[in-house]
Structures are given as C-alpha cells and as structure tokens.
Image (cartoon, coloured by chain):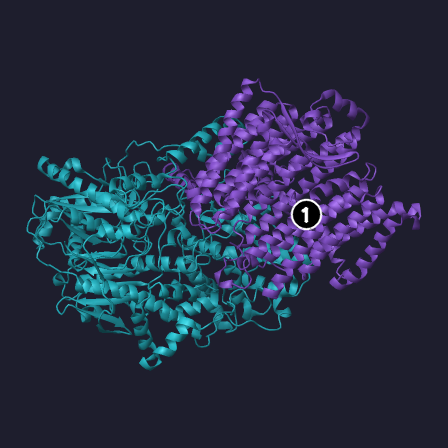
Amino acid sequence: MNLRHSAFYHSGLAREVKSSQAFDQEAVLLDLKHFLPAQGPLKDFIHHNTLHAFQHLKFFDALSRASKLFGYKVSLSLYEYRRLYVSRNIDEDILTWIIVQRKGSQEVNRWKEKLISEKYHQTRLPRIGQLRSNWKRHYQIDLDSLVHPTLFRVICSYLDQGIAMWKFPSHPEGFLASLRELERNSFTSFFRNKRARKILMEGSHDIASLLKILIGDKSQYKQYLFDQQFAHQGWSGMVAYIEDHPQSLLDTKKVSLHDFVFFELLLEIDALDSTFGNIWAPLSLKVRKKPVDLFAEEEIKSELDEVLSMWQEAFEWTHYDQALSGILNQKRNQQQSALKSFQAIFCIDDRSFSFRHYLEKFDSQCETYGTPGFFNVEFFFQPGSGKFYTKLCPAPVTPKYLIKETASNEKKEKDVHFTKHSHTLFRGWFITQTLGFISALRLALNIFRPKASAATASSFAHMNKVSELTIENGDASQTENGLQIGFTVQEMAMRVEDLLRGIGLVKDFASLVYIIGHGASSVNNPHYAAYDCGACAGRPGSVNARVICFMANHPGVRTILRSNGLNIPDAVRFVGGLQDTTRDEIEFFDVNKLDEGMLELHRKNTSVFAKALDANSKERSRRFESVNTRMPAAKIHEKIRTRSVSLFEPRPELNHATNSLCIVGRRSLTKNLFLDRRAFLNSYDYSLDLNGKVLFNVLKPLGPVCGGINLEYFFSRVDNQKLGAGTKLPHNVMGLFGVANGIEGDLRPGLPSQMIEVHDPVRLMLLVEHFPHVVLETIQRSDEVYEWYINEWIHLVVFDPLTEKLYLFRDGTFTDYHPIQRAGVTSDVTSLIESTRENISAHIITTP
Amino acid sequence: MTFFLELFILIPVAGFILSLLIPGKKENSISWVVYFTVGIHLCMFLVFTGFWFWQDRPILNLKDIVLFKTEGYEFFIDFYFDKISAVYLLVGSFLTFLVGIYSRSYLHRENGYKRFFNTILFFYVGYNIVIFSGNLETLFMGWEILGISSFLLIAFYRDRYLPVKNAVKVFSIYRIGDVGILLAMWMSHHLWHENITFLKLSNYELVSSQLQSHSVIGVFISLMILISAVAKSAQFPFSFWLPRAMEGPTPSSAIFYGALSVHVGIYILLRTFPFWEHQLSVRILIGLIGLISSIIATGIARVQSSIKSQIAYASIAQIGIIFIEVAAGFQNLALWHFAGNAFLRTYQLLVSPSVVTYLIREQFYNFTPRKQTIEDSLPKKIEYTFYMLCLKEWGLDSLMYRYLWNPLKWAGRKLNVLSLNGVIYFFIPAYLAGLFCVYNKSLISQQIQTYLPMLFSIIGLVMVIKSFVERKQSMLSWVLIIMSHFWIALAVAYNEQFKFDEIHLYLSGIAVSGVIGIFCLRRLKFHENESGLEKFQGHSYRHPKIALVFLIACLGVSGFPISPTFIGEDLIFTHIHPDQALLAFVISISFIVDGLSLIRIYARIFLGPHAKSIYEMAYKSS
C-alpha cells in the first residue's frame, strides 16, 4: 500500500469514529479492489486464483458464496457431470466413497439416486446488480448504455500504451486532474449538462456526496458501488491493478479506482440530468423494497450445491486415485547407474513432464530434475538496447539485483503494417496504393507458407544468446536505480547451494549439468505472456538459466560450496539452455566456453535432446485435431513448428491445460509413470532434509504458482464467460494492455476459451514425499501456506517413504489412503498416445 | 461470353445451398465447400478475364430472366460486366478465398462454425449479384442480401448483448441506404419509363437529352444514390457504424468491414457515374462529403486507443479520398486505390492481435515519454477541443439517435392507446370498408378519392411506427407491420388504375410470411410463456429452429428477394407519380421503419443473452 493510500485510510477511520453509520469511502474502495479481478496488463500475465477474494473460506463454501454474490458459474453443470459418469470418467466406486464420507453409508443409495437422476431447477438471481437494476425498473433508463461507452473510451485513451497517434493530454496529478485540465481548456465537454461538469471543476465533492445525489440512503452506498463497478469488472479491475502496480505499464499513468468511480458517478448524474432535467429523486426514494444486502450471511447451502460438490469431488478423486495407485504400484528402483551421461534441471512446469520422460527413455543414463524455472536467482533484467527492466522471478518477489545485457547490435525487424503511417491521411493515401498490394501477397504467403515475422512473439528473442551479461558484482557500490548490478560471489554461492540442495542434487554429478528454462512462441496472440514461464513473471527463463549456470561454474562459488560440504568436482560444467514449449526447440548458451572434450560430450547429448523433442511434439500433437498423431515424430514436429508461426492458428500450444497434479519428491516416484503431461514435478529429497527445513521453501511458492495456475484454468473453464475471456476470435486489443469484444466492450480478464477447452476443471492435488508429521508441521508454519490446504483449494497427500503408504490431509489431520481403482499398465507409450485425443488416465510403464 | 455471367452468380448460390445442407458438426466438409466454391470462382474469373482481355475488354450485358411483366412495366434481372466489375470481382474473390482458408482453422471448434460459413457464402452471393448487376433492380437484390448477411455476421455472437445491439444499429443505417436505392428506382422509372440498364446509362446522348428536360428528377436520383453510397461506405455522417461492426470473429470483420462491404458504396457511385457525370452540383457534393469524411475520420483515427476502431477510421478516411477521386472522374485511380485499401485493411485487421507483441517490443526498445504531435502546434484550447470532439466521434452516433430515432420513438409513444384488440376491432372493419370502396369506386366522390391514398398511407405509417415502439407484445408489433403493408397496398390501389394481380403479388408474400411469423410467435409463447420486447431475450439459445423460420418470415415481410413482395415493392412505387413526392416519402419512411421494426422484433426475441440462463451468459457489458 502506498503512502497516499494509507493516509486516506486513516482519515477514513477517523470519520468512522464520528458516526458509526457513516460511509467509509476508503474502506469500500479497498473492499472493491479485493473482489475485482486482479489481472494486470497483457505484457505480464501472471496466473492467480481467480476467486482469491474468497480464499479465506473453505473451497465449496467459497464457490457457493461467490456464485450467490456475483452470479459466477462455479462448477460444471449437472448434465456435464452426469455425462462424465456415463462415460466412466467419474468412477462409481469413487462416487460411493465420496457419498459415504459425506453422508454415511446408510445414505448412499438415496444420494446416489439424487446425483444421478433428480431434477433440479436453479432459478435464483445473483445479488450483484439488483440495487442498480432499479434505474431501469423505476426510471425506465438504461444507465449502462448511456454511461459505459464514454467511460470506457475515456479511460482506455487515458491508459493507452501506444495505439493512439494523438495521445490523451494527461496531467501528472492523475485521471481526474487530467479531465479537469481538458474540460478547462476546451469548448466542448464530456458532459451534456452543466451540473456534472461544475461538480468536476469545483473539486469539492467526494464520492459520498455524489452518491447522496444519486442514491440518498447512506446504507446503500456500498452496495451501489459494487453494483456499478461489477457492471464492468474488467475495466475496474484493470484500474485498481494499475493503481497498485504502476510499474506494470511501460508508459506509466497515475490512476486510481477513486478517480474512476468518481468519473462514472458524474457520468451517471449527467445521464439522469439529460433525461429528467435537474430534478429527479434519488434512487432510494423510489425503491420501496431494499434488495438483500450483498454481503449478508446466507441461508444454508441448497441441495443442488451439495450434489454438485459431491460430483466435483468424485470427478477429482477418480483422477487422483488412478494417479496415486500408479505411484504406489510402479517400480521404484532406487539404485542408480554409477555412470551418468548428463543431468538436466527443468522447470516444474507440467509441460516438462513428457520431455523429461523421453530424455530418460532415449538415454537411460541421464537424470532429470524439476524446480521452479527462475532457478533460485531473482533479478531484474535489462536487454542490450532496452529502455526498461524486466522482472525475472515469481511475481510476489521484488528483487534487489539487476542483470544487464551488454549492447548487442541486434536489429529488431520492422513491419510497416503495424506502424501508424498507414492511418494518416496523406501517407495513408500513398501506402494503401503501394503497400496494400504487398499486404495481399503477405497474406497469401502466410496462409500457404507460414513463417516467422516481426509479428511473432519468440521465446528466443528474449535474450541475445551471444551477448554478455553482467552477472558478477565487482563491488557493492555498483548500483543503478537502487538495484545492485550483479551478484557477489557469496550471494551466488548461496543461491546455487539452495538450488542444488532443494532438488537433492548434492553428489554424483555428471560431467555436464544442463539447466533448461522454458518459453513459448506464438503469433497473433495477445495472451502470449501467459504461455511463458510463470516462475519468471511470465517471461522465458533463458536469462535465469544462463545466470545460474554462470554462478555454478564460478571457481569462487565452487570453493565456498566445498567449504559448506557441497563438493562439485572441478571438471563438472553447467550449461544453460532454453526450451521453446511451442516449437519444441532447444537452444544452449555459452557452449563455446566448453573445452573440446566437453564439447564432444555435449554434441552427443544434443542428439538425445533432438530426438526427445521430436517425441515430445508427437505426444503433444494428439490434442491437435489438424495433426495426425500416427505420423512419424519428425514430420509431426515440422507441423508443430509451422503452427507456432501461423496467423490463423489460435492454439499454438495448449499451455497448462489439463494440469491437475503436483508431485514433490524424488524422480523415482514417477519415473515409470505416464501421467499425460498433467503433473508439475518438483524434485526434492526428503533424506537430505529430515526436519523439513528445505521443504518449507519448496512448498511456499507452490500454492501461489501451481495453485494459481490450476485455479485460473479451473474457473476460466467452468465459467468462460464471466471468469474467463470468452472466445478470443472477436477480441480487440485495447490500449495494448487488455482485450475486449468489439470496440465498446468491457475488458475481458481470464483465459480465452481456446486455452481452456480441453481442461478438466479439477483442483490441484499436491503429493509430498516425506513423513506426514513433518509435512503437517511445515505447512502450519505459515498461515498463508496453510490456508491453501486447510481450506481445500489444493488437495494434499503425503507419501511416506519408509512405510510406502499414502496419507490424505483433511480437516487438519492425516488419514490413511488406499487407492480404490488400479492404474492402467502399458509397455508402449507411443501406441497409448496414438489411441485417443481425450485425457488418458495414469498408466504404469513396464519395460517390455 | 455472356453465358459466363450467369455462372458467376450460380456457383456461389450453389455453394451456399450446399453449405446449408451439411450437418453442423462436419467442420471439414463445410470448409471444403467454401474452399471449392470460392476457389472455382476465382479460377474461373482468372480464365474469364484472360479471355476478356484477349477479346479487347468488351462491355458485356445479359438481359436475363424477366420476373414480371405487365403493360408498361417489366421487372427483369440484368447482368453486366466491365472493368469495374472485373476489379471488384478480383478483390472480392481473392480475399474471400484467402480468408475462407484462414477461417477454416481459425474458427475450429467455435460454436456456430457452420453458421459462419453459411453467412460468408450468402454474403458472397450478394456481393456477386451487386457487382455483376446490370440494372438497379438486380443491384437492389444483391444489396439486400449484403445487408442481411452483414447483420448476421455482426450478430454472430448472438448470445451477447453488444454484438446484437450493434448489429441492429448497423442494420438501421443500411436501411437508410436501401430506401435511397428504392427511391432512385422509383424516380428512374418515371424518368425512363422502363427499368433502365446501366448499359443504357452509359449512352451519353440518351442520358443528357433526358436530363435536360428533367434536371430536378436527375438530381433527385443522384442524391438518392449518393445517400445509399454514403450509408454503405460509412461516410459522413454515418461513419460511426463501421467500427461498431467489428463484433464478429476477426476474419469476418477483416474481409467485410475492412474490405468488401464498405467499398460497395464506391461501386455504386462508379457504376452510376455516367448518369451524374454532367451534374456538377452532385459531383461537388460527392467530393465534399468525401473531403469532410476523410478529415473527420483521420482525426478520429488519431485518437483511437483500440486497434480495430483505429483501422476502421483510417479506412473510412481513405474511402473519403476515393469518393473525391470518383467525383473528379479518376476512375482508374479510384479502382486502384480501392483494391489497395481493401487488401491493406484486411491484412491489418487479420494481424491486429499481434499488435501487442509488436508495439510493446517497439516501446520497450525505443520508448520516448511523450512525442510531439502535429496537434501540439495548435493553441491549447483548440487542440483540446478537437481532441475531445474526436474522442467523442463528433457525436455522430448520438446525433443519429437524437434526430432520427428519438422523434420516431416519441411519435410512437403518443400512440400507446393502440392495443391488439383495438387494432383488430377497429382497423380491420375500416380496412374492409376501404377495400369495398376500391371495388366500388363510384360510391365516393372523385375529390375524396384523391385524398385517400395519402390518408391510407399515413395510417400505414402510423401502424408501423407504433409497431416500432411497442414494448410489451411482440404479437401486436408483428400484426401492425403486416397491416401497415395492407394499408399501403390499399393506398396505392386508390392512386392508380387498380390492377389485382400487382397488388396480389405484393400482398401474397406478406400474407404468407405474416402467417408464418404469427405461427412462430405462438409457438414460442407456448414454450416460453413470454414474448415481451422490453429487452433482448435470446430465445435462439433454446429454439434455434423457430428463430430461423421467424427470420425467414421477417425477410419475407420486408420484401427480401425471396418473396414476390420484392417485386411488389418496386411495383408499388411505379404507381406513385413523380409529383406525389409526399406520398413517396411517407411510403418510403414506412418501409424504413418496417425493416427496422422487423429486425428489432427478431433481435429482441431471439438474440442477446438468454434471459433465463443468467449463469451461463456473458456480462451485458462484454
């Protein structure tokens, strides 16, 4: 919270003391912000729990409350669940188990009957919007259609990042100040009547006094503001987000939810004045029957709610149970071959799962690890000729370090189609008659032979691979804008050590250790940032991979590590790399710094990587209808690459769709398991951390990162219209920070339907390999962490490595869990993935 | 060679019909039909034009089917081909072909995949009829198809509020254009005493000798054509519709509102050029409209902060310049400019989602906080005034509301006394009385007879206005529309020597469609027990079939070229004398409002967020 803000907050409190009935403007605005969508501008897409405002409640309580308040659809429909049941995607035994747990074994048949065939009618109206709908009912006036077009256009122009050629003449004091400045120096006005304009210019009103004109009854102010802002939650959410994160815009704008609300209230007054003249009664005088208070405690949950939640759990556990059975029953051979070809560390990302599997398949002597893809180095990055810093670490962290790329004279490709010249009158006249015909050619070429262009967002363009980075800090005085340039040797050593100990790689190093970040490429995709690495704040992980390898190779770092008992032989080299998850390509950094022998080894490994990438693209392709998965891997790979540069392809890749599991433990837990790319894998060795000290740091980011991703997909899937962005096909880019439908729509936060359509809305199940009491003690160390599990936003299961038993966490304790179903068994993953485009349940892979 | 002209129309029609027959789930078959239809069309065009060039570019004219013929009146379809058609066909088939392929993958898994391609082919049919048309009547057929398919494409996402609202808005502007053509047709009947072909219009002596004696009529016709061109090409003062049409999937916005639909206005000007070539005042007016449009649209484009509206206004500005070029007689330049603008804007719209990647990167590496723009050299007060005016789109949108629709609504509200029963019990007997008198004209004096057409047409107008503002009962609204047509027919029956078959032709389509419409409304009422017009109800969500049948009924009533009413409408106008401008005005106003009212009933009942499924619908503001 910034200073200005807190000052307001206190004055708000002071007012509250005077009169308990008073409307506390600042408190209401804070409340509003809490409930509004918290998604920032497009360029940094950070996944988060869409219903974060309800996270203090138990999952299903939160759902029914959110649904009741805001009209969200929070689960699949009854019809969909029943269809899943018929198609055996919900297992009957699991369903029985769920009902027994909830209702006891006597009630099973009665409830099963209800779940499967009872008819329910859902007719209740959401509470939001009811108060404000009275304008239409009693005044026959549609305020939305009178106010929204102006409101959206003005705020969009104010925040615009570079679409308009003639920019909003903004005033440094903020939005309202800018409006005053415009109105003062103009012969025209945004208002049609004098009153609203006068109020704006005088500047003596506050939100409460405007509400007095509009509403009258103080007790309804808060509800009215909620109704009003939730009529366009996209715009309000964006304003609130930018107010709190001004740095999220490159061309920074000072804006506040207060100013935005103020302007909207003025527009409403103006619209009413235009229709009724200066004299009209405030809303509360006309409304006899007050609508239910938005936040009133509610009656007990309806039976339908309960039925839906049982279906949901049965759906989830059908899937978890198969995976758990697989984990229990697959062969865990702990002995590892002494000779190691290479080790590779990847991001925990669910997209890495299959790639790691194929690496291990094609080279049985290699080892792979997973860890959050910023690789424990947090910093701001400034590319060669970049004018800004880019944060490369998880969103909540604010780094103190800066890594700079020394200027590399890389020319950025230009494309006149995106420049403003074609929109001017005279140059436009010339351009249409010349460039216009080239456009026709370009269009034809891109349709028949798609290739990368200036419009493509490419993960490899994030950093120039031949440039130099300032990673090492000479002395602490080297700073820029309060950031230390580079890390000291001590700081480097600490980060490397934590990383390696965290994933359990402390001995038996192979000669080459790869650390591979990931990014994505796409074209014609405003949501491009959502496809990159979440742990790098929605950017590719290339710089992080390169930086951590530099550190790990640093002789000084090695010395410190050795003194801390972590002995990395001098011959061991770390090599950074970037995997493009859309194109299935990989690029290695600083390979020229390897000596001849290492280079030879590296070349050998490269061919394994290439083969694994082909196989990986084959596995991915089974979700794409335009690709025949039975074709040879290399051919499929070519098609996959073409997809990533095709203008007409709204699904370059499917990103985190279908994610559902997160497994914290050794690779041996999952090595012989096919999990259909649905699991985040975080390497962790409990035997190195018996008291759970490291575990806490491992678990802490998993909630916000993996849980955030999972829940964003969950809610975008179940209510793609209100919590997701709807189909992306009609999207129109607004001010470079958001998308809307058409030119006068509300911003659409959330994920577009093309990203979530194959996703099954199930919560994340976290499996930790450790002793239950250690895990319990660990998660209880922080309320923030504990909330995810105790409120069931993430399911938690523990695998006890000694007893080899599973324990399920519920209501604060662990209880035994015995899988009900049996995982499938296959000796041939290839024929498995060729068999269907649908989800495939967990399979144990046996060696033939 | 003229044989090919028919083929150029028949191929898209065949493709369209075929595409209707394929089940909606078969994405591949649907897209292949489009692919082949437009592909064959494009190939045939290339071969044909090669041959045509080789033959030294003759102007082709084909008098096709005569649809209706009586003494002194002949309604026939006529096709025509020259340079203008060639360029429009090239651009149209090339872009439709590319965008068709583009959309095959782009729309994959989208709800309404089939509907999308049906509408595109339907649009393509209309486009071809327009550019091959050899007389105003044929052109009008295509024109109507363009209008309705535009409406359907804008309202493609029919479960959301804004697309539907904007589709109705755009349709209402198109309707103004429709009546422009209708009135131009009316007057030119009286000018030439036949359905004149464009071929004859290019006969200089013929045109100038006619116009010498009828200069006012000439100017009137030109103005009507100009109105329809201005409406269709989104020129001043109708510019605001174009950005609002960008509600459908991006490829459809790109091809129709970036390229084809907006340039049809220019086509009609080019086509009728020989007619107004010697009317200096008209040429100046066209140039002036082009100039104003291009200046205003450039300003508006400069302040747009959303990518699609920026491209739309930039395109309007270029079309304004093309207007000037056409007025100045630079036909080749105008055609070249049209093609370039169409290609450029289509491509720009198609790649518009990439703008985030491109411009953010650009900004990241080359950011300068605030660049000076040309406007900064203006005095501050002027600068800010212009900025705000441009941001408000010069109030064009609300202007239209204030001066066109609000008076209508106001007038309609004065008529709130009319109820369904009242209408039936009073106006049906009155109508029957009027009808009786038609058969027995001797009963009433000659003098009264001269006033009756006006009186009856005003009754018709009143009914249709009342229908337009009716808020509660859709059935009342519908019945009023049907009745208004009957009153208009009656009015004309008094006006002229009465011919049964003409009136029957006109009313037969209306009656049949009217009954179908009533049937649909009753059926819906039976299922949903609700049929108000207060807000969009979105019943197509659960009753897509009723929605389709009702839409066809609406088209039948509105004189769409699927019912004989289409010819009847034209006939009605031939019976209005040139000196009865007021009567023509009243009837044409009632035709405008009639179309609006029909589309309003359809939109309110069947489109928009489904009123009974709040939990599955998008927010109204999205």
Tell me the chain of label 1: B
Give the chain coloured purple: B
User: How far from the left and from the top, in percent, is residue A570?
Assistant: 7, 44
- Residue at 20% in and 52% down: A828
Q: Colour of chain A?
A: cyan
- Is A339 located above or below residue A385 in the figure? below
Residue that numbered label 1 is attached to: B558
* Amino acid type for the residue under numbered disc 1: Ser
Question: How many residues crowd around disc 1 within 10 Å: few (fewer than 14), some, or many (20 or more)?
Answer: many
Q: Seen in the image, is A173 located left or right of residue B1?
A: left
Q: Report the front residue among A6 and B34.
A: B34
Q: Seen in the image, is B467 located left or right of residue A756?
A: right
User: How far from the left and from the top, in percent, is residue B33?
Assistant: 47, 40
User: How far from the left and from the top, in percent, is residue B327?
Assistant: 65, 26
The image shows a total of numbered marks equal to 1
User: How far from the left and from the top, in percent, is residue A601?
Assistant: 11, 39
Q: Quadrant of the N terminus of chain B?
A: top right
Q: Report the front residue among B196 and A56.
A: B196
- Is A664 located above or below residue B212 in the figure? below
Q: Seen in the image, is A678 located left or right of residue A605?
A: right
Q: Seen in the image, is A84 located left or right of residue A145?
A: left
